[in-house]
Image (cartoon, helix red, strand yellow):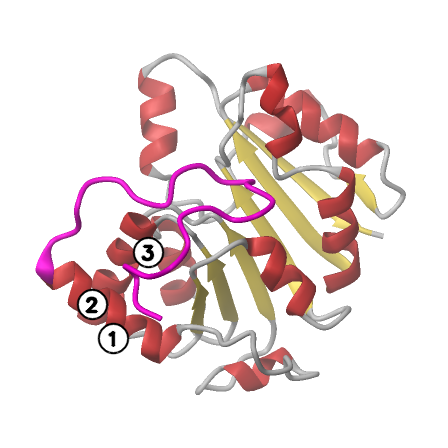
Amino acid sequence: MTSEERPTRASEAFFGRRRGKTIRPAQSVALESGLARYGLDLSTAAPADLRRLFKTPVGGVRLEIGFGGGEHLFHRASSAPDSGFIGAEPFVNGMAKMMMALEREPLENVRLFDEDATRLLDWLPADSLDGIDLLYPDPWPKKKHWKRRFVSKVNLDRFARVLRSGAQFRFASDIDTYVNWTLLHCRAHAAFQWQAGHAGDWHRPYDGWPGTRYEAKAIREGRPPAYLTFVRM
């Protein structure tokens, strides 16, 4: 299936539009060739050991959901070549940017999925991930759309199933209502414990944090980001 033929919306609709501006011809070529090289095929069973997904030896595997243009994912993967990284991003333009970066600098410790991340989470084996990052997700600010926020009881159940004990779920956002929403949902879930020693901890970026274009925009517009870390109990 080509990028033009893929469905424009997922059934659970945790994300918004699939496309922005028409991608350039070079991006289109990079997208198709990149998906052939890095894309995950969910029609076959996932390996019991996710490290087998990668062409290079890795010691553990992390997942980033909704990686946007891939700045953070590419930085993490290139900085930690001994770890495996899976990225999920349904927005075609963001995936195309990531594929352009991988065309310039190929990485063997990356695999990508270009559709609904809930499908990927249900495909992954239990206790298989060393971490999940959900960074600046769509906040769905209107109350009637809150059910479309990715942080929910059902998705935290999915996280709890695939994360190893002691693994981290990291959430970053500049939208205070979504930060509070996430804190409440994770505090209500027995599998997760918030890691914050004192009040300032959740305003301090993660170690090695490269920043993202969304974060830079939020700071310019006066919205301080929050960085939450939860441990899978």
Q: Write down the residue under mark 1.
A: 33
Q: Which sits in the foreground, 30 or 9?
A: 9
Q: Residue furthest right?
A: 190
- Tell me where residue 94 appears, x and y as whole percent: 31, 49
- How far apart, in angstroms, are the residues tagged by discs 1 and 3? 12 Å
Q: Position of residue 160 (x, y in %)?
A: 78, 54
Vertical arrangement, residue 85 with respect to residue 54, above or below = above
Give the Cα distance between marks 2 and 3.
10 Å
Secondary structure of residue under mark 1: helix
Give the residue displayed 40% in from the left and 48% down from the top. Answer: 8
For disc 1, the neighbor class at 10 Å (few under 14, some 14 to 19, many from 20) is: some
121 left or right of 86? right
Where does label 2 land, which residue? Answer: 30
Tell me which label, 1 or 3, sits earlier in the chain: 1
SS class of the residue under badge 3?
helix
Above or below: residue 215 compared with residue 133? above
Quarter of the image with the N terminus is bottom left
Badge 1 amino acid: Ser
The picture places residue 119, in percent across and down from the top left corner, at: 61, 60
Residue at horizontal 25%, vertical 54%? Answer: 97
The residue labelled by disc 3 is 95
The magenta stretch spans which residues? 1-25
Hey, which quadrant is residue 158 in on the image? bottom right
Q: Is residue 128 above or below residue 136?
A: below
Relative to 7, 184 lies left or right: right
Give residue 231's position: percent from left, percent from top.
76, 48
Relative horizontal placement of residue 142, taking residue 129 as reference (left or right): left
Circle 1/circle 2 CB separation < 8 Å: yes
N-term-proximal mark, 2 vs 3 = 2
| Residue type pointed to by label 3 | Met
